[in-house]
Amino acid sequence: MRDIKIEDRLIFALDVPEVAQAKDLVNQLDDSVRFYKIGMELLMTGQYFQLMDWLIAKDKKVFVDLKFFDVPETVGRTINRLSEYGATFATIHGNQALMEKAVENKGDLKILAVTVLTSLDRGDLDDLGFDCNVQDLVISRAKRAFEAGCDGVVSSGLEVPFLREYVDNKLIAVTPGIRPVANDDDQKRVVDVATAFKSGSDYIVVGRPIKNVDNPYKAASNIQDIIKTCF
């Protein structure tokens, strides 16, 4: 089993428009969450790196979810600069050369390759011109990420069992689209907490089921309790 602290396996998605809201949520969540994902919405505040510094100063781990995609050299230089900030994970989304350049420049940062976004289904892949099913595409992308030296992948819990079977157990599997109950939002390929870990996920990313409730601390604590029963 991978050496991951149980309380670190829950990553909360800080998907809010303002840094003040993000800090308020972190303070509310207190010791129920130790790992935070910050993405593009907060980047637009102009205070993204101040927020990262603030989180790290509070002994929280940070997942930079900006899905870097550009010319490989540009991504490599960007990852090199990002590695100075103390984040734990960063996402990239691209071809083999891009992944290799990111890995070359990552330092202590762990690089996660996005396989197929959990908001996409078979119909969306048709629209994008992919002539294969979701599972085959995820496996193909995960294999390439592993060959490029990426530390892990971001993958729906529906496909994680196939990653474990056809790619390699060394890959960290981070699973978004976690829903404790049935959902009607824009995430299509979802699983619940226990299923994600039983399928082989190492971390789960949870946003709305914690953020959009009256007591986020209780919601996060309940998820942590479920995680403990899985290990």
Image (tube, grey):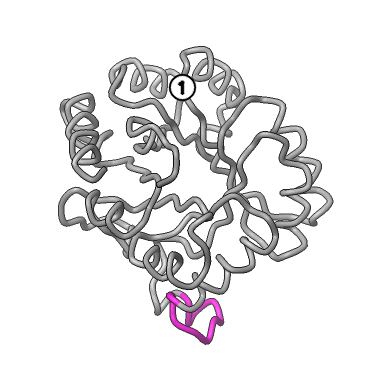
Q: Name the residue at 45% across, 66% down.
A: 163
What is the residue that sits farthest to the front in this orientation? 1
Quadrant for residue 196, please give it.
Answer: bottom left
Q: Nearer the viewer, residue 126 or 203?
A: 203
Magenta stretch bounds? 125-135
As drawn, is 136 to the left or to the right of 222?
A: right
Residue 116 appears at what percent x and percent y?
49, 65
Q: Looking at the image, which residue is at 20% across and 56% down?
A: 183
- Quarter of the view holding residue 43: top right
Please report the residue visible at 62 percent of the width from the left and 25 percent of the height from the top.
86
Percent position of residue 82, x then y: 70, 33
Check disc 1 and report its element: helix, strand or loop. loop
Which residue, given by chain and number where applicable, does mark 1 sit on?
Answer: 60
Tell me what residue is drawn at x 59 percent, y 18 percent.
50
The residue nearer to you, when weighing 69 against 149, is 149
Q: Is residue 29 left or right of residue 84?
A: left
Please identify the residue farthest to the top as the structure is shown: 57
Relative to residue 221, is residue 136 depicted above or below? below
Whether residue 128 appears in magenta in the rendering, the answer is yes
Is residue 129 part of the magenta span, yes or no?
Answer: yes
Quadrant of the image containing the C terminus? top left
Residue 4: x %, y % from top left: 42, 36
The x and y percentages for residue 118 are 40, 60
Q: Is residue 25 above or below residue 68?
A: above
Kind of residue sitting beneath label 1: Lys
